Image (spheres, rainbow, N blue to C red):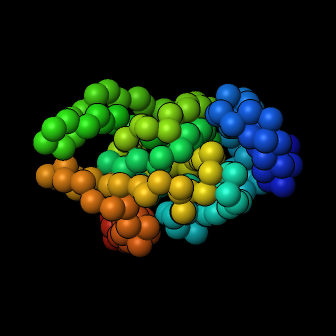
């Protein structure tokens, strides 16, 4: 049975022993290998959003709930991350910088039980491609909300870079939740 406090402590110990994502990926894979148990332990979300489970200078653990059909614009983290899906689907488009902005460089679709690492320099956008909520555990190798190097986000349409705005991210979740509720 998934234990949130033990999971966080195991992740913190793993990062203290090795500053890479490798051991954390194994912990996340183990957690999402029992998706029903993990969902039961974390409870049913009332709405799409960011459920912060742990935040420290060494690590951030978030239980994300994506609204149906929700899309999050291209962004970076400036730290490694590990994503594990325990309900629904998550599609990631990976981007690379060009002289004029960004260009798509690949994609990866994840389903229940899938785990993937993202390197420190990855730029990606996220889409929940299905008509129900998607839930995922995200573990970041540092303080997600105050990284040592400022984060960026890129406009969906123009792909113009701008500083990451956490309030814009929260608004995106709220707006996607409102659209999903109206569609029901």
The image quarter containing residue 20 is top right
Viewer-side residue, 119 vs 134: 119
Residue 184 in view here: no
Image spot of residue 184 (x, y percent):
38, 65
- Number of numbered labels in the structure image: 0
Image spot of residue 137 (x, y percent):
62, 47
Image-based side of 184 in relation to 160, left or right: right
- Give the vertical position of 52 relative to 31 (above or below): below
Q: Residue at x 14, y 52 (%)?
A: 158
Question: Which quarter of the figure is the N terminus placed in?
Answer: top right
Q: Residue at x 32, y 48 (%)?
A: 74
Viewer-side residue, 154 vs 115: 154
Residue 159 in view here: yes
Q: Residue at x 33, y 62 (%)?
A: 163
- Give the vertical position of 77 relative to 23 (above or below): below
- Give the vertical position of 29 relative to 166 (above or below): above
Viewer-side residue, 171 vs 44: 171
Q: Residue at x 43, y 67 (%)?
A: 166
Image-based side of 40 in relation to 140, left or right: right
Image-based side of 142 in relation to 92, left or right: right
Image spot of residue 159 (x, y percent):
19, 49
């Amino acid at each position: 049975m998934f234990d949130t406090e033990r999971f966080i402590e195991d992740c913190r110990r793993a990062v203290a022993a090795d500053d890479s994502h490798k051991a954390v990926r194994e912990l996340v894979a183990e957690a999402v290998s029992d998706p029903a148990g993990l969902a039961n332990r974390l409870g049913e979300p009332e709405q799409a959003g960011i459920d912060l489970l742990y935040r420290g200078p060494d690590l951030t653990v978030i239980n994300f709930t994506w609204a149906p059909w929700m899309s999050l614009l291209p962004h970076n983290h400036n730290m490694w991350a590990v994503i594990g899906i325990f309900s629904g689907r998550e599609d990631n488009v990976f981007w690379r910088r060009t002289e004029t902005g960004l260009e798509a460089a690949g994609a990866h679709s994840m389903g229940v039980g899938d785990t993937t690492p993202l390197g420190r320099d990855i730029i990606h956008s996220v889409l929940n491609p299905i008509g129900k909520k998607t839930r995922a555990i995200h573990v970041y190798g540092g303080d997600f909300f105050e990284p040592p190097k400022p984060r960026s986000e890129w406009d969906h349409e123009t792909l113009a870079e701008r500083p990451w705005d956490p309030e814009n991210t929260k608004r995106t979740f709220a707006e996607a939740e409102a659209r999903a509720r109206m569609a029901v």
